[in-house]
Each structure stands twice: as C-alpha cells, then as structure tokens.
Image (tube, helix red, strand yellow):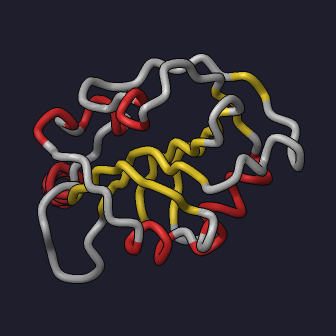
Amino acid sequence: MRLLRFKKSFCIICILSVFLTSVGCESKNNNERFNYKAIEYRTDTEPIENRFSYLKGDIDRVYWKAGIIGRPSIGPTPYFMTGFITLTDKKFENEYMFNSVDISFPGGIDPAITGFASFKWGENDELKKLILGNRFIGDVLYDLENGIIYINVENL
C-alpha cells in the first residue's frame, strides 16, 4: 500500500515538474528576458493607437519594439511591447500628480531616440490604468519635461 502511494505521488510530482518547465516558470522581468538590442525600433503609430486607445489622436511619434514571449503555441500569443510615445501636446502634467522615478533603461532601449536630451520620469497609477486598460500589465512612465510616455508592457 505504501509503495502504491509513493508511486502515485512520484508520478504526480514528475507530471507537475514537466508541466511547469514547459510553460517556462521564470522570475525574471522583461529587462532580463529579452534582447532589446537585436530588435529594431518601429515607428508606425497605428499598432500603438489600436492597443492604447486612450492615447488615440494625441500621438505625434512613436519608437517601440515588440516580440513574442516564449514559444508560439495554440491560442493567444503572449507578447511584449516597450518604447516611447511622443504626444502632440504635453497634457498630463497638469491633470495628474506624478511620483518621481529613477529608471535605468535596459540595453537597446534609449529615450534619446526621441530627440530629447534630458528627461524627468514620473508615474501615476490612475494614468497607467487608463492607458493599459484591461489588456496589458507592466510599466507606464511619463516624462514631465517633454510629454513622452514610456511603456514596458505584456498583453494579458
């Protein structure tokens, strides 16, 4: 009887470990998982406007990168997006209170691509929720000096 329980428990543990390994249990964040240097910046605004409808009509320029997370499989494909959205009008600094943020961008992601030299990054949870909606999780920062939004997100 004990041998039978042991075999059953052992089989369950083996199955669970194979499953967890196959879905890729990682504790790394985006900055450690992706080789941003190998991905070219995109500058087309339509994909950004389609995914972040709160910003539609307010976007001047975009510099963004995206890629698939893990291996493609059946069902919705998980992906990440990261980059900078330059707004037509600096509008959020008067509408929201921002907490100052010190950020170190991962290799291959540089806000200088926007053409500005200095930045003052801040975050606001309410603005983040409006921009991400219920389709994404991740970071949204706002540059108080230049009206630039930085996104580093994954789809749900």
- Count of residue discs: 0
Identity of the residue drawn at 30% across and 61% down: 79
Q: Nearer the viewer, residue 93 or 135?
A: 93
Identity of the residue drawn at 52% across and 58% down: 60
Q: Position of residue 20 (x, y in %)?
A: 23, 53
Query: In the picture provided, is 129 more to the left or to the right than 25?
Result: right
Query: In the picture provided, is 99 more to the left or to the right than 23?
Result: right
Q: Quadrant of the C terminus?
A: bottom left
Q: Quadrant of the N terminus?
A: bottom left
Q: Is residue 82 above or below residue 59?
A: above
Asked whether the viewer can see residue 51, the reply is yes
Q: Residue furthest bottom?
A: 75
Q: Nearer the viewer, residue 143 or 24?
A: 143
Q: Position of residue 10 (x, y in %)?
A: 16, 51
Q: Position of residue 84 (x, y in %)?
A: 45, 45
Q: Quadrant of residue 45?
A: bottom left
Q: Is residue 127 above or below residue 47?
A: above
Q: Is residue 41 above or below residue 145?
A: below
Query: In the picture provided, is 29 more to the left or to the right than 116?
Result: left
Identity of the residue drawn at 53% across and 55% down: 137
Q: Position of residue 58 (x, y in %)?
A: 63, 64
Q: Nearer the viewer, residue 28 or 34?
A: 34
Identity of the residue drawn at 40% across and 27% down: 112
Asked whether the viewer can see residue 5, the reply is no
